[in-house]
Amino acid sequence: MTTYCKFETALDILVGKWKPVILLRLLSNGTMRFSELQKAIPDVTKKMLTQQLRELEYHDIIHREVYREIPPKVEYSITAYGQRLTPLLQAMNDWGVAHIEHLNELYGEAGTEEALKRS
Amino acid sequence: MTTYCKFETALDILVGKWKPVILLRLLSNGTMRFSELQKAIPDVTKKMLTQQLRELEYHDIIHREVYREIPPKVEYSITAYGQRLTPLLQAMNDWGVAHIEHLNELYGEAGTEEALKRS
DNA sequence: CCGCATCCACAGCGATACTG
DNA sequence: CAGTATCGCTGTGGATGCGG
């Protein structure tokens, strides 16, 4: 007896402290190694990066390719299925940009940044 | 020096343990009193409900109308600006529905529920 | 009726050290 | 290089009680 509306599902999959950045990186750079991602996202720890990547992988958004070499090499990329997120991300981005505008009008430039931190 | 892509902003505003349900309720029911919301969302505590409502209010997604009566009465509703979320929520919902389908194909009906809990 | 204040439990995340 | 394991802090959310 699940409820009809499933927009929460999309949220669950996209939300995560580092998932948005990871997705953006992979979408713009294509395939990336683990270490490249770490360099591209300076504040993430190995633990968190691994965890978030695994979750995205489990949802078939990204692909994990392991090369059995010494030293090891692992490459991450967006799956074909994952590409289908793009329009949604675009829509969310557009809304986000408009929303920041809107907050500026409501509270002024100063308040906006703080407003975004609240939730 | 903020980054260009702002789809994370949309996430921040929509995410919250009870925000999705609240939005759905208000969108389908129109104006609702605090107590009605509480009844409609059985597991939420007053504290959490208040908090999430305030955040949505701060972002101008919902409107809070206070009637200075005894006993008090407070009504919540979606603002005109908040209505502009609808297409986005619809898009997210569509993607969510499709994604659940996709997970079923990957892991079977059994695995899907657990998959959704992971992230 | 609506909401705030306080206290507490637990999960999330970071830091660090260790492994194949 | 690409992780895993462990520990400790911190923040979020639940439970409860008070107040306008």
Image: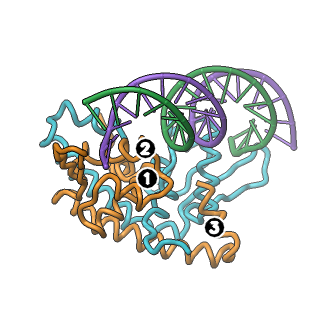
Chain colours: A cyan, B orange, C purple, D green
3D distance between C-alphas at marks 1 and 3: 20 Å
Left-right relation of B1 to B103: left
Tell me where residue D4 appears, x and y as whole percent: 78, 42
Q: If you read the primary sequence from the N terminus, does the residue marked by circle 3 or circle 2 appear first?
A: 2
The residue depicted at 43 percent of the width and 52 percent of the height is B18
The disc numbered 3 marks a residue on which chain? Answer: B
Q: Mark 2: which amino acid?
A: Met
Quick one: B22 or A11, which is closer to the camera?
B22
Q: If you read the primary sequence from the N terminus, does the residue marked by circle 1 or circle 3 appear first?
A: 1
Tell me where residue B47 appears, x and y as whole percent: 42, 41
Left-right relation of A42 to B1: right
Left-right relation of B58 to B89: left
The disc numbered 2 marks a residue on which chain? Answer: B
Residue on which disc 3 sits: B113
Q: Quadrant of the C terminus of chain A?
A: top left
Residue on which disc 1 sits: B18
Circles 3, 2 touching at the beta carbon (< 8 Å): no
Q: Mark 1: which amino acid?
A: Trp
Quick one: A42 or A94, which is closer to the camera?
A94
Q: Is residue B4 among the parts visible in the rendering?
A: no
